[in-house]
Amino acid sequence: MATTILPKSPAPAHQPARGAGPAVRRSTPLRRRRSIAAWGFAAPFVLLFLVFTAWPVISSLLMSVTDIKSRDLRDPFNVNFVGIDNFAAVLRDPLFWQAARNTGYFVIVGVPLVMFVSLMIAIALNTGITRLSGFFRVGYFMPVVTSIVAVAVVWRFLLKDDTGIINVALGWFGIDGPNWLGDPNWSMPAIILMAVWRSMGTLIVIFLAGLQGVPASLHEAAALDGANAMQRLRLITVPIMRPTLLFGAVLTGIGYLQLFEEPLVMTNGGGPLNSTMSVSLYIYRQFGFGNYGIASAMSYLLFLAIVLLTLLQFRLLSERDPRPRKKARTASPAASPTTAPEGSTR
Amino acid sequence: MSTMTHKAPGSTSTAVKQNKTRSIAIGEARPQWWLYLSLGIGLVVMLTPFVCMVLSAFKPEAEIRANPPTWWPQTFTLENFSELFTRLNFPQFFTNSAVVAVLVTLGNLVFCSMLGYAFAKIDFWGRDWLFRLVLGTMMVPGIVMLVPLFVLVSRLGLVNSYAGLILPFLAGPFGVFLMRQFISALPDELIDAGRIDGASELRIFAQIIMPLCKPALATLGILTFLGSWNNFLWPLVVASSEDKYTLPVALALYSTGQNENHYGLMLAGAVAVVAPVLIVFLFLQKQIIQGIATSGIK
């Protein structure tokens, strides 16, 4: 990464000379003028971007191999190189593993759940609902635009043990609801419930767009051949929607792995027996303790997890395309990157 | 991205027609009442938290805690909202959120459209690697940047300042992509015509391209504003005194602090954070829904 960063420090002023360099591209005075103009347009963004985005990303990696603490802010020369000690310390920390397990639980249950529910609702909205369709869409989408903190406060109220609306509603069916946020076994399901509620809208809209690409004629033909709704879903809708499903899964996976606000607000930062302590929340806590090196190492491990999950999803979901090439599994690692842009542009 | 954004309205109507013919062909011409029913129940579930929030915010504290709980407020009170002003410094939080969101939005509109234009229409030296660099950082989770950004901002002496709240968000990659996609679709002839007439690049950008970008600018503006209004982690870290808290920060800190069980106040605060956004959403829902669908969850 650092190598790609360095050439950028030459500011626009250096561009004409550099632009003349590559022999492949003809360097005309016009092209040179355009380059200067373009870098003029780019300059404000690039400057801010380098300082406040690119540099922190690199600097985080650098910090992760030092023993930097909050008190070193005043004394930068007190920072020592410690190699992979931070990573080793993090991986030995049982609370980190608990946070990783909790986050994994949240992602492994939450992502498929929200994908399934959203797909069902999108299909329902796409099937024969002509009236009220826009109305439903707005309703399902509403939670997406709201502040997570605000809705987490509201959900904490809804999930109250005795008088929360959720346990009251469960009581109508004779179910004695648990003390959601106070019980280590139920605190994470409660947070999943709220996260699904809040992020469904995005997926519904993405899936509705994907469903436009499923030709009705295929469904008609299959129905005439006697395929029931479940078979048509599995054999027609899902295969054709694969790129859309991949896009949805990647987006949701990346978002869910960064679980932070919900446990912080709903369970006062970690929940009973740290049952809702997420990796992001633990990083934030280490940052609060002033352990900057440890926090940086942890955040890179989270980044790594995000990259791995994304790659995994590409392998799982873009392997088989609608025209099945049987036994093509060995070729899939090469094939997945090419399908990537396609999935993300949907 | 843009293909979806721009095609969506047209293709929806054709899909609706297709579905009509399909349901007749399959023999389901009957209005599918069970679909409406289940979607309706789902909608009630989706909206219940909002309804509860608003109704309970108007109840006195004792009634909020009453067992069994009441649905409609038995005693209607504005006390919770007035406490936002007396117990908390609500106008200050509101102003902070608004100032930050407005400036972040303006910055993104200007900077992202400038770079988006350069990416879309000028074949300049370094374009490809710059584009890849900006694209590459989109996947980096915000928390990776938290620590170094805080170190940077504190070295610059900007902790607990508006500049510290705003600067890191002025140049967002998402806006660049949105603007690049949109401007790419505009015909090159417009720009060539401007060049033949002797207009400078800046003038072409400001007087030919920008006026045509209003829809994209509107989408970007709304989304950036929403994102900033709801942003939490960075303001939580960088705002260290009450006079710089944004609404979500204030709400989170007070709802987990000594007011933990003061539900009325917290619900009124939640209403104050959520209501402006929901009102804007109801007016601009088409643009917001399409925009967020292309950009992702958070």
Image (cartoon, coloured by chain):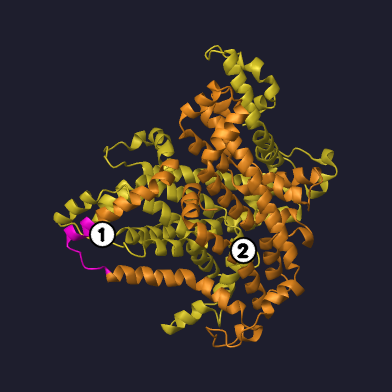
Chain colours: A yellow, B orange
Q: What subunit carries mark 1?
A: A
Q: Which residue is at 61% across, 77% downward?
A: B57
Q: Which mark is residue A230?
A: 1
Measured from the top left, where is residue A46 in percent x and y? 65, 34
Say which quadrant the C terminus of chain A sits in.
top left
Q: Is residue A274 visible?
A: no
Q: Which mark is residue A19?
A: none
Mark 1 crowdedness (10 Å alpha carbons): few <14, some 14-19, many ≥20: few
User: Is residue B30 located in the magenta-colored stretch of the structure?
Assistant: yes
Amino acid on which the number 1 mark rests in the picture = Met
Measured from the top left, where is residue A21 in percent x and y? 61, 13
Write down the region rendered in magenta.
B20-32
Sooner in the amino-acid sequence: mark 2 or mark 1: 2
Amino acid on which the number 2 mark rests in the picture = Val
Residue to which mark 2 is pinned:
A149
Q: Which residue is at 72% across, 70% downward?
A: B257
Measured from the top left, where is residue B205 in percent x and y? 58, 32
Circle nearer the viewer, 2 or 1: 2
**B129 shown above or below A209:** above
**B256 shown above or below A115:** below
- Which residue is most to the front? B197
Quadrant in the picture for residue A297: top right
Q: In the image, A238: left or right of B147?
A: left
Q: Which residue is at 44% across, 44% downward?
A: A312
Q: What subunit carries mark 2?
A: A
Say which quadrant the N terminus of chain A sits in.
top right
Quadrant in the picture for residue A47: top right
- Which residue is most to the right? A75
